[in-house]
Image: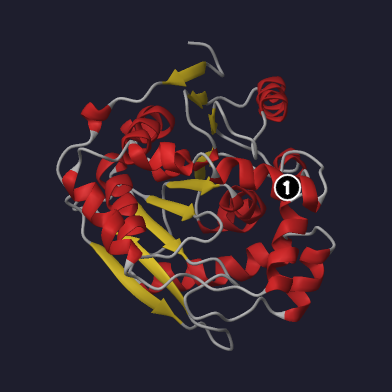
Amino acid sequence: MEQRPKVTVSLDHRGVDSRPATQVRQLTLRPAGRSPLDALVATPQASTGVLVYFPGFNTPLGPWEIAKCAHLADATSLTVVVTEIPGMSRFGHGIPKAVRTEMLHGRIDAWAELNLAYVAAALDAGDVGNPDYLQVLGYSTGCSLAVSALPLLGEWGPIEGLNLVEPVAITQRNIAALQAHNLADLGRMPTALATNKGHEWVMAARKSQRREPSVRYSPVDLIAIGQVLATQGLIEGLDATELARCALVRGSRSSLCRLRDYERLHELLLERGVPGPTITVDGLGHQLWHSFPVIVQVTKAMLGDATASA
């Protein structure tokens, strides 16, 4: 089989069945000396390892993310662990000043280390322990946090695969351009959300989410996050990391993850001999992770073969 096959995913509603069976624990974490953050731990009946999931910008851990985590756990037989992003939680606590200063200079490592302190607390609170099998998943902003976290995560257990959905920090651009691309993709949100129609329990999860508190963040933290995402730091992080496998996912209409940058990332992984599919979701943009039918299809495409032998 080709080492890095290019795969196109077209919307198919048939993969969405009844509500996922895995129960998801909701936790509030307060590591020593740190602000509280929420977390989710989804443990399937016969867990074969751990999937550490780094969510995207502005992601509350309510019914919508609970549904995603339950599906990921069902589909992979992995315990899924996710926390709010530091500086972007329902509690509204800001990013620590020293960490923010690093981010304002385009450096993400301190932010990722802070995030990992909460992930470690979630593993402990969820009675997960150190995994013998570990997959890492990031969406959008979470892709950058995931890549920066890889060296420390590798000390917890062997990382069998990295899965990057709509990576943003793969090209150098200014904040104005980043915001313009973000607005273009936000305009594609209705198309993504419309794909959930016809699935009653999915629509119910979306409706319930609207009644939940949103995450809060300060303008200065927003600028700091923007500075990190306006770099090509993700590619630099990948260059410095050994990878057993790396799956890539992009929406064909995405502005935040542009085609030429995505193709360059594919070529860099191909040159290094890193296996894993390079997936394009037809007809959707950056907001593809808000389409449950697409989440089902993408999970199978990027993780199906990888977790079959876990």
Residue 196's x, y, as percent? 29, 40
Residue 101's x, y, as percent? 81, 72
Q: Nearer the viewer, residue 80 or 140?
A: 140
Picture residue at 72% right of the left edge, 57% below the top: 226
Residue at the extreme bottom of the image, as rendered = 33
Element assignment for label 1: helix
- Quadrant in which the C terminus appears: top left
Please tell me whether residue 13 is drawn above or below residue 26 in the rendered image: above
Q: Is residue 158 visible?
A: yes
Left or right relative to 271: residue 117: left
Residue at the extreme top of the image, as rendered = 1
Residue occupied by mark 1: 178
The quadrant in which residue 271 appears is top right
Picture residue at 48% right of the left edge, 83% below the top: 30
Residue 32's x, y, as percent? 54, 87
Residue type, mark 1 in image? Leu
Q: Is residue 128 visible?
A: no
